[in-house]
Image (cartoon, rainbow, N blue to C red):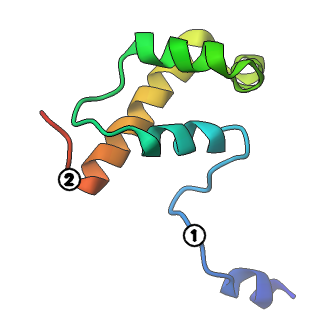
Amino acid sequence: ETDAVMAEPKLYQFQRSDMWKPVYAWLETLNTTEIVKKSEIVRWLSENPAEKNALQSRNSRYNFMHYIQKLHKKLLRKRGRLKE
């Protein structure tokens, strides 16, 4: 039984929790070479109150804003589109 679990391929190096999947989906739709600004994050969160509540229930505002920017930076680097 343990061998079967270990043999499953991992889709992501870091597993995306359900709470962060909408954030990843949104970040992947952005067509930019710069890291998402806090004002853009605030606008997206105001348009998606369920995601905002889920993030705020487990993280401080500072932490999830910083983490979203960190995720976007990773995505841009992965695509070779980061403007440094």
Label 2: which residue? 80
Identify the residue at the far left of this view. Answer: 84
Disc 1 secondary structure class: loop
Compared across the picture, whether 29 is left or right of 73 comes to right
**Quadrant in the picture for the C terminus:** top left
Determine the residue positioned at 54% across, 56% down.
14
Q: Label 1 is placed on what type of residue?
A: Leu
Please determine whether, in this image, residue 27 is positioned above or below residue 34.
Answer: below
Disc 2 secondary structure class: loop
Determine the residue positioned at 77% across, 24% down.
50
Q: Earlier in the sequence, mark 2 or mark 1?
A: 1
Please determine whether, in this image, residue 46 is positioned above or below residue 26.
Answer: above
Instruction: Work out whether residue 64 or residue 3 is closer to the camera in this orientation and state it.
Output: 64
Label 1: which residue? 11
Disc 2: CA contacts within 10 A as few (<14), some (14-19) or many (>=20): few
Number of marks present in the image shown = 2
Instruction: Work out whether residue 55 or residue 44 is closer to the camera in this orientation and state it.
Output: 44
User: Which of labels 2 and 1 is toward the front?
Assistant: 2
Determine the residue positioned at 45% across, 21% down.
66
- Quadrant of residue 5 in the image? bottom right
**Quadrant in the picture for the N terminus:** bottom right
Whole-percent x, y for residue 7 in the image: 68, 87
